[in-house]
Amino acid sequence: MFSRILIANRGEIACRVIKTAKRMGVGTVAVYSDADRDSPHVALADQAVRLEGATAAKTYLDGARIIAAAKSSAAEAIHPGYGFLSENAGFARACAKAKLIFIGPPPEAIEAMGDKLASKKLAAEAGVSTVPGHDAPIADAKEAVRIARKIGYPVMIKASAGGGGKGMRIARSDPELREGLERARSEALASFGDDRLLIEKFIENPRHIEIQIIADGHGNVVHLFERECSIQRRHQKVIEEAPSPFLDEATRAAMGAQAKKLAERVGYTSAGTVEFIVDPEKNFYFLEMNTRLQVEHPVTELVTGLDLVELMLRVAAGERLPFSQDEVKVKGSAIECRLYAEDPYRGFLPSTGRLIRFRPPAEVAGPQGTVRVDTGVEEGGEISRLYDPLIAKLSTWGKTRAAAIAAMQAALDRFEVEGIGNNVPFLSAVMGQRRFGAGRLSTLYVEEEFPGGFKGVAPDEATLSRLAALACAAALRIEARGFAGGPARPGPIEGVRAVMIDNRRWDFSAHAAADFFSLKTPDGVAIEVETTWQPGEKLAEARIGGHNLVVRLDRRSSGFRLRHRGADLIAWVLMPRVADLMVHMPVKAPPDLTKYLLCPMPGQVVRIEVGAGEVVEEGQPLALVEAMKMENVLRADRRAKVTKILVAVGAVLAVDEVIMEFETA
């Protein structure tokens, strides 16, 4: 086994690799850019080497500097994590030339599988089912249209050299195809330095199911069963689970066998993933092979009891796999939610800023259930626009899928993130949906379940009443102790309080003593609230009418902001007479912003598509803004005349910064 390894990555995956290496007694070396000098992975490693600069291109993607850092720190091997140089065959070869072990597959396997065109051909030769498509790079838009018409719309445009949703577009018509080609080519070149694109048939209502494999250098290849990764936004995975609730044993076995065949065909070693799309009839087709550790590997670890990072290190050190295919078993069910720095209320656009509060739920590991948190950030840290928006992965395991979902709901309830937009409300909403609970998934799940975009969750009547009761109890606790949590006022608190949420009102006759609140509505309905919440605490755990709730509770003037499982509400707690008068208060109308194009996320202006004085039509592209490696097209929402362009190409913009102004055309 190695005495010291360098991790050529950052953030969550760097921390993940370091933790296993430390457990194995292997020394670790971190590398960091100037933007990451205070990041947790730097402190967690035994040594750290600075890579001068901030952008990925000048730091984590500079193979020569990574190798120099490894040599200077006496590391014997390099673990690339995922992303950056993890699937770069040239870097793997450079490691070998420098007499460093690359903890991953051979460069020949990376090369063969890293090119989607070549990998599809190899997969077909190995007897793996493949999607109908074109087996050569697309020359131009004219050729693309001809091929798409031959295959039949809809088609998928994909970057030949990459993945992760970069350089990927769905087209359902000739105009969509032409625009999608331009966007996909630009993203592919920026992300992978390779703008070659391929086109293949887009399978309607597919599920994304992948097979994890592990192979050693002695001819042993084992698959570790499947992960379902169907819930995605912008073609990027957001919720994964193992095993899939859809597969039967025959399909599972067939997919595993084909994944092993492909690995054997390319002489694969280390951890890798063969991805498939599966149609509603359980026909499956090869999508691509990821020649690295996957972001979602924790769910496989939770159901198999194996540590994939440890296996990668052992295989790279020349050891044999310590188990055969028959010895690998799946136990229970696991789910992973990716917590992204993004605003789900704005189409999941990236968000940046400082994490003023970051409190993950407590990790738990036991026979009744598991909660696991993988992260590479900490409270007070900065989320930069320079890197990927993933801030943490939350994984749960249970004896059944229902138990894993329940554990995830409870863990998300306790995950506190403030200071940046984040997708915790969206994840909580999905976990509570009947369709998700039934396992009826597809890659179109988000579009189908949230057709107008994510707007939050409207609680049912019973939950709304419990939240109103909690707000009343919290207000009484503040009256008893003061907002700063002073000594308790002697004796019980009694009286009538009105709680108003949206257009609903509850009048509670209240009696409060210690941690017990007895509330009664005018029609005699009694609600009992038990809570130890104290003023100043962000999370309120309560038992209300026999039901347990965990609610994010933030003080507001005369009330609270309540956040619970995707719902975000304001509750006013007032004396009844004041509540009577509230209905007569004027409502301030929001400002009219329709004459402005606002930047919806922090990012850099790549292109301005129109000029001052030009009349634009609904749906017409106006500007292109890049944020966290993704290009976002901003379009006109109606016919209008452009009167002013207020920013230039290259400008770095904040959220809601004005890009251009309009007038009615």
Image (cartoon, rainbow, N blue to C red):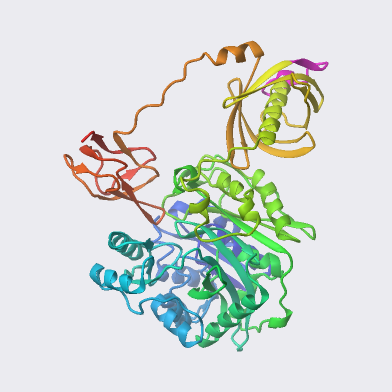
- In the displayed structure image, the side of residue 522 where residue 599 appears, left or right: left
Please indicate, yes or no, whether residue 101 appears anywhere in the rendered image: yes
Q: Position of residue 40 (x, y in %)?
A: 57, 53
Which part of the image, by quadrant, shows the C terminus?
Answer: top left
Between residues 464 and 539, which one lies in front from this camera angle? 464
Please tell me whether residue 492 belongs to the stretch shown in magenta. yes
The reply to whether the magenta stretch includes residue 381 is no
Residue 18 in view of the camera: no
In the rendered structure, the answer to whether residue 62 lies left or right of residue 363 reads left
Q: Quadrant of the N terminus?
A: bottom right
Residue drawn 63% across the image and 75% down it: 252
Q: x%, y% of residue 533?
A: 73, 31
Q: Main secondary structure of the magenta part?
A: loop
The part of the image, by quadrant, that contains residue 94 is: bottom left
Tell whether 611 sits left or right of 61. Answer: left
Q: Residue at x 74, y 68 (%)?
A: 331
Rendered image quadrant of residue 365: bottom right
Outermost residue, left side:
613
Magenta range: 479-495
Q: How many marks?
A: 0
- Which is nearer the eye, 564 or 580? 580
Q: Name the spot of residue 22 as percent of width and height, x first.
A: 66, 65
Q: Is residue 73 left or right of residue 305?
A: left
Q: Position of residue 2 (x, y in %)?
A: 61, 76
